Image (cartoon, helix red, strand yellow):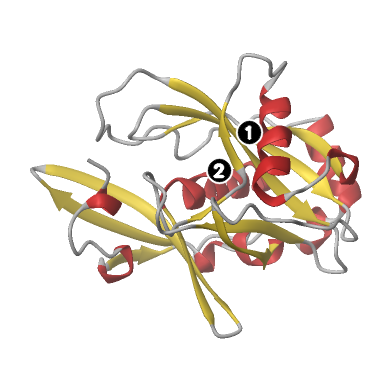
Amino acid sequence: MPLSSLPDFDPRGVPVAGVDAHLPAVPAQAQTPQALRARFAHPPVWTPEVVLEKKFLDRAPAHASVLVPIVLREQPTVLLTERTLHLSTHSGQVAFPGGKADPQDVSAADTALREAEEEVGLERRFVEVLGALPTYVTGSSFIITPVVALVQPDCELHPNPYEVADVFEVPLAFVLNPAHHRRHVFEWQGVRREWFSMPYQDGQHDRFIWGATAGMLRNFYRFMLA
């Protein structure tokens, strides 16, 4: 069972075990469109930090992709969604646009682009795929490929109200600064689980980025800093 399905479980209430303010942030000059393109064209040797969650659901592995959309504003942002409350998995959580691979998808990027168009109405003509990060395996056995892309800021979004309760943007500089990366530890049924969170105050909205989404952003930080 995922932690988010436990009665009365609120990840915001789990104590913070540590904050990584001692680690360096990714420099601003490395976050420009040109620098991002160059980084993916000639990726460094690096090791992802978070690749496998402890299993909480016994099911057959399934491939999926998410789009990590970097919106090319004056200060670049990362586009995220808040899932609707009635969904059977990860309801109400902050997530990237994405989902399971379909047989007709020709690649992980194709899956991410199709899902982003279905979920938030992001048309492919506004998207420039840069590349992919290493797969991230969730506790529910989804093998997720994060596909990083640049998105034109004049794109028009049309979120699917069944799946998406809200769409918002977080500054890229915020998620690439480990001073905002908090570590949590939680023990349940004798199993120790650890995860990152990156709470972001978006006006009056308290956006709680945690779990797989925060883990993939943490890997993106490691990739950018390598």
Circle 2 crowding by C-alpha within 10 Å: few under 14, some 14–19, many from 20: many
| Residue occupying image coordinates x 40% and y 54% | 86
Looking at the rendered structure, the kind of residue marked 2 is Asn
Q: Which corner quadrant of the image does residue 106 belong to?
A: top right
Q: CA distance from mark 2 to mark 1?
A: 8 Å
Image quarter of the C terminus? top right
Pick whichever of labels 2 and 1 is earlier in the sequence: 1
Q: Percent position (x, y) of residue 215?
A: 47, 47
The residue that label 1 is drawn on is 133
| Residue occupying image coordinates x 37% and y 27% | 141
Left/right of residue 128 with respect to residue 178 in the rendered view = right
Q: Which corner quadrant of the image does residue 38 belong to?
A: top right
Q: Is residue 21 in view from this perspective?
A: no
Of all residues, the one furthest to the left in this rendering is: 190
Q: Percent position (x, y) of residue 205?
A: 53, 79
User: Please, is residue 74 above or below residue 223 in the view?
Assistant: below
Left/right of residue 167 with respect to residue 17 in the rendered view = right
Q: Percent position (x, y) of residue 50?
A: 44, 39
| Residue occupying image coordinates x 84% and y 31% | 41
Q: Is residue 143 in view from this perspective?
A: yes
Of all residues, the one furthest to the bottom in this rendering is: 204
Q: Secondary structure at mark 1?
A: loop
The residue that label 2 is drawn on is 219
Image quarter of the N terminus? top left
Q: Secondary structure at mark 2?
A: helix
Name the one closer to the observer, 74 or 22: 74
Looking at the rendered structure, the kind of residue marked 1 is Leu
| Residue occupying image coordinates x 31% and y 63% | 11
Q: Which corner quadrant of the image does residue 31 belong to?
A: bottom right
Q: Percent position (x, y) of residue 7?
A: 17, 59
Q: Are marks 2 and 1 in contact (CB under 8 Å)?
A: yes
User: Please, is residue 182 above or below residue 104 in the view?
Assistant: below
